[in-house]
Image: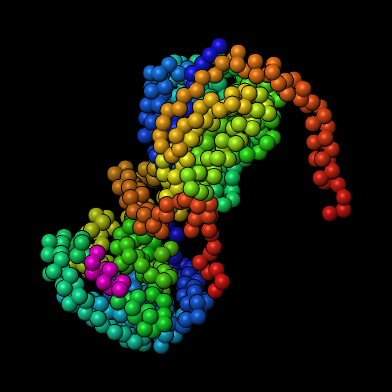
Amino acid sequence: MEDIAARSSKVRKILTNFIANEIRRVGMESAVVGLSGGVDSSLVAYLAAEALGPQHVFGLIMPYKSSAADSVADARLVASKIGISVEEIDITPMADAYFDTYAADASPLRCGNVLARLRMICLFDRSAVHGGLVLGTSNKTELLLGYGTIHGDLASGINPLGDIYKTQVRDLARHVGVLDHIIAKAPSADLWPDQTDEGDLGFTYEEVDKLLYLLVDLRYDRKALIEEGFAVDFVDHVYGLIQRTQYKRRLPLIAKVSGRTVDREFRYSRDWGV
Amino acid sequence: MKHKVGLAQISPLLGNVEKNIALCRDAVARAQAIDCSWVVLPELALSGYMLRDLVPEVALTLDSEPIEELSALSARIAITAGFVEETPDGRFCNSAAHFEKGRIAHVHRKAYLPTYGMFDEGRYFAPGDRIRAFDSEFGRLGLMICEDAWHLSVPYVLAQDGAEILVILSSSPARGVRGEHIESSQAWGFIVRVYSELLRCYVLYANRAGYEEGVSFSGASRASSAGGATIAEGPPLDEELVTVEISSHELRRARLATPLHRDERLELTMRELERIADGRYRGPF
């Protein structure tokens, strides 16, 4: 796998310019970012502060009662290190109002999705308050594996990390100066106690990023991946995950009736007119 | 000679060659059960249509297992079917093969790849560079794949090459629904009738059904006699095995009654086309 660290200054420039360009293009100057205390959201906050100036970045910390205590502490640490303002919204009352009244039997997965979507509601509301776009923090590994909640953490105005694999995120975070212990801690959606990404997924980011890079970026086929030494089951499992979660990476399907359907023949770039 | 032909209005699964081969096998069995001697399957029947980056994953070489299976099946009943072909020189083509008597009788590679509006084929496929008729047990055939039939020159060349039966394999989306009419289907009905009337050929049109990416395929497979009459009309949108009877006597009678075919002046056409083509590259700009 190519080492992104070697070209981090270029990637850093592309991402910071992207943030500034896309936000100013639509007549705004601010960004809103949810801070979890993890490496992805921390990196996005660093890049946004560099792109827009820290006074134009609004961090939102949105713990639930079961969230790890050090998540909030780390998120606050990141905000103070880069000098952005930060607001804490405890989502416990709104989440529990729903759970207690309508979803007492919800599985951990359902609960996690509800929490992710409540955070989305807060972020987009704060986006209206501050006149800033919501920055996405899903990286390329998560997007490809579908490891995210649709209309939850996958929702954003623009996403600077979506083409950067998780292992590359760590390299870039190191280059940008994100605190070491944030880079080093086990990645977690923190939707329930002791949850880790790698525990959920059943493999490490190191392993899967190597596979994804060959499969997606270099277009190795199944046979070639197996020849590279990847286990057959691993290749098939990851391919299946990508295939089954394709809907999360696309707009909802529109039933075609007319001769010019939105997103089918009606094709304008999103930057149309701005 | 009379033959019963089945136009299999199937709904292929996007990207799943194995399941689509099963659909083809099933259509072949159903056609055989009602005494068809030939079954025509739609464009990209083995792969589905909205392929995008799936093209290399579903591509088949002519010696691949699924193609050999269709060859083998054709020992009992002739089959025409569309698929993604990977050519020996590494191009991906939107192809159709005619199988009969246990072998591949002909391969046509779509020459006109629509790349406008909702269509993206030019991005993913290489265009075919041959338009040729060939002999079969049903007479001389000419194959076209969907957009090929929207270019007048294609059926014209096939007819001049001796085709008696023109076959159009299609994955045509339902577009422009006005009241009870689907404009894209109406256009196909018109095209099929006009070609059969003017070229004095049977025209068989096999179009798929089903949905991909919110787009429905319009079905309405159909056929016209060599005299321009509609002789089969399948249902819109739904899956169906549409049948039609073709007869070499009918073809002969249609050509006797209106001998356009006899009177066509190929040299005159060639001369004028050459003059036009030469002129295209003359002049200062």
- Residue at image coords 53%, 69%: A271
Q: Is residue B102 visible?
A: no
- Residue at image coords 41%, 64%: A162
Which colouring convention does the figure follow?
rainbow
Q: Residue furthest front?
A: B179
- Residue A41 location, x and y as percent? 34, 73
Q: Nearer the viewer, residue A255 or B234?
A: B234
**Region rendered in magenta:** A113-121
Q: Is residue A111 visible?
A: yes
- Residue at image coords 42%, 28%: B241
The N terminus of chain B lies in quadrant = top right
Q: Is residue A186 above or below residue B225?
A: below
Q: Nearer the viewer, residue A210 or B70?
A: B70
Majority SS type along the magenta span: helix
- Residue B97 location, x and y as percent? 53, 27
Q: Quadrant of residue A135?
A: bottom left
| Left or right of A182, for residue B178 | right
- Residue B53 location, x and y as percent? 47, 48
How many labels sit on residues?
Answer: 0
| Left or right of A192, for residue B67 | right
Q: Nearer the viewer, residue A125 or A157?
A: A125
Whether residue B198 appears in magenta in the rendering, the answer is: no
The C terminus of chain B lies in quadrant = bottom right
- Residue at image coords 31%, 42%: A232
- Residue A252 location, x and y as percent? 39, 57
